[in-house]
Amino acid sequence: MRLCPLPAVNSWMSCKHFPCTDFFIEQIFPVGGCCEALAHYLAKDLGLVGTLNFTNCVNLEMTMKHFLFLVAAAAGFLPVVIIRAKPASVPYHTLLTELATVQEEIVTVHNTLRRGVVPPASNMLKMNWSEEAAQNARRLSTQCELIESKAVERRITNTFCGENMHLTSYPISWSNVIGIWFSESKYFKYGQWISTDDEVIIEHYTQLVWATSYLIGCGISSCSKRRSTQYLYVCHYCHEGNDPDKKNVPYNMGTPCKDCPNDCEDRLCTNPCLYYDESNKCKTQKEALGCSHLSVKLFCKATCLCDTEIK
């Protein structure tokens, strides 16, 4: 079957309760003919929009079974989830994060996904590239270990960073990797806790959409493992997300930019607090001791220095 053109933002989808052995779309492009229609109905979690137009769908060589599946999915009769299909291989040298084009791709895809979260977020910060975080991520990727790094290895000026990792057997685009992390959203229900009995992972997704993370830096390394080459992708998110007490609410639910009405750019806030609190009791400590107290001043910088910023 003909695939849609290589997009700036990729997504992967298939049906959850349908025999999909011969039907999947590896790449969805939100512009043009069937690709536009499919993006609208099957990749709506990404916030992409399109106009339903099946006039060119014959180009996809779909059978009636596939067409009926799309209609049923669009009508809500079948659950549709974003999952990973086999992505295309790309040259390794085109993935190096020293390239400005790669940095732009990573930041753009993250911001596209963050502004399109469901339910919508009232305090979602726009992400920007951090070369300091990228240097840490590149260094850690060379270790070729799919193991969470130590917090001190993710430290940058003023804050610590969270971490997402992905290991592949061949090089794929950063858009694909980010999409794989985002696909964990199918297990996430805002405000609800995942049962400990459920063997599912949502931490890549929750870090990706953690509202107060506003800087990102990534790295990739080619690793020789057991006579084969693998590729380790590492991204650092600053400030760090995935607070164990708030993982079920990675952002505030509400009208986009409600928490930053004077600092809003296309549904994302642009007023991050540059500091972080090293204590989870800063609010009560500020009220009891005041920000002039040495311990509060040292360990509660966000609480003391950021009044209107998102923190």
Image (cartoon, rainbow, N blue to C red):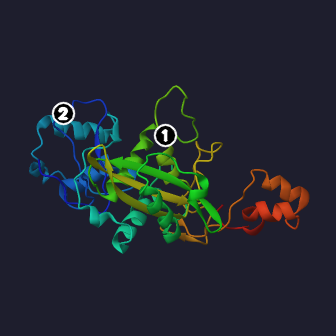
Check disc 2 and give the amino acid type: Thr
Within 10 angstroms of label 2, few (less than 14), some, or many (20 or more) residues?
Answer: few
In the rendering, which numbered label is found on residue 21?
2
Image quadrant assignment for residue 49: bottom left
Tell me the residue at 85%/55% (across/down).
Answer: 285
Q: CA distance from mark 2 to mark 1?
A: 26 Å
Closer-to-camera residue (45/289): 289
Picture coordinates of residue 5, whole percent (x, y): 19, 60
Q: Is residue 273 visible?
A: yes
Q: Is residue 186 above or below residue 215?
A: above
Q: Nearer the viewer, residue 139 or 268?
A: 139
Residue at x-position 88% and y-position 63%: 290
Q: Is residue 4 above or below residue 203?
A: below
The answer to whether any part of residue 123 appears in the image is no
Q: Residue 19 at what x, y percent from top left? A: 21, 30
Residue 124: image x %, image y %?
Answer: 55, 59
Q: How many marks?
A: 2
Residue plotted at (22% across, 46% down): 25
> Identity of the amino acid at label 1?
Phe
Left or right: 134 in relation to 282: left
Dot 2: what SS? loop
In the rendered image, the quadrant that contains the C terminus is bottom right
Assign a secondary structure to mark 1: loop
Q: Label for residue 188? A: 1
Question: What residue occupies the far top of the structure in this picture?
Answer: 197
